[in-house]
Image (cartoon, coloured by chain):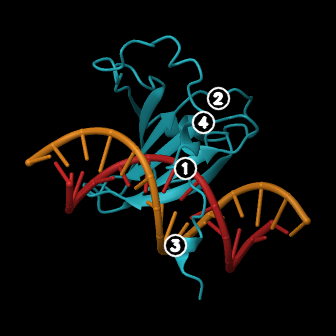
Chain colours: A cyan, B orange, C red
Amino acid sequence: MQVHQKSKEIRPSGISSLDCETPVAKTSCECKGEKNKKMMMRSHRYAFQTRSQVDILDDGYRWRKYGQKAVKNNKFPRSYYRCAHKGCKVKKQIQRLSKDEGIVVTTYEGMHAHPVEKPPDNFDNILNHMRVYTPF
DNA sequence: CGATTTTGACCTGCGC
DNA sequence: GCGCAGGTCAAAATCG
C-alpha cells in the first residue's frame, strides 16, 4: 500500500496553478505591489442565482468538474467546474443554498473565446427565473 | 480508447 | 506563529 505522500513528488509549491492566468495583468500594474495588491483582480465574475433542482445548468458549453469542497456557511458542498475547451480557461462555480435547496448559485469566472456547441433549448425559460448579481 | 468524473491530499491567504 | 477556510490538482474509476 503505497503511502499517498510519495505521490506528490515534485511540486514547486503549487506554482503551476497560476501559469495560465492573467499574462498582462502584472505588466500593467507593476507598482510597488504593497497597497494595490488586490485592487481589481478578476473583474470577470458573474453570479447567477437560478432556481433549479440540478446543479448542472447547461448554458451551451462543456464543463468538466475539477473539484468539490464543502463550505462552512452552506450545508451542501460546492462544485467547481472548468470549461473543457482548447485554450478556454473559463471557470464556473456552483453552490446550493442551504436555506433553499431549490436555489442554485452559479458563479462564472472569465470569458469564453469560442462559440457555443450546444444550442440553448429551454435556457431562456431558466433565465426567466434567473437573477444576475454582479459583485463588481 | 478517450473523455469525464470522483475522492483525497496539498497549498495559499487571512485572522487572531 | 498557528489554525481555519477555501481552492486546485492528481490518480483512478467509469461511461459512451
- Quarter of the picture containing the C terminus of chain A is top left
Q: Which mark is residue A12?
A: 1
Which mark is in front, 1 or 2? 1
Residue at mark 2: A112
Tell me: residue A124, above or below residue B6: above
Callout 3: helix, strand or loop? helix
Q: Which mark is residue A19?
A: 4
Q: Rounded to the nearest whole Å, what is the CA distance between mark 1 and mark 3? A: 15 Å
- Which residue is found at the position 55% from the left and 37% from the top? A18
Tag 1 and tag 2, C-beta contact below 8 Å: no
Image mark 3: chain:
A
Residue type (three-letter) at the residue carrying disc 2? His
Earlier residue among tags 2 and 4:
4
Residue type (three-letter) at the residue carrying disc 1? Pro
Nearest the camera: A77 or B10? B10
Residue A60: x, y in percent? 67, 39
Q: Rounded to the nearest whole Å, what is the CA distance between mark 1 and mark 4? A: 12 Å
Q: How many marks?
A: 4
For the question of whether residue A99 can be seen, the reply is no
Q: Rounded to the nearest whole Å, what is the CA distance between mark 2 and mark 4? A: 18 Å
Q: Is residue A89 left or right of residue A114?
A: left
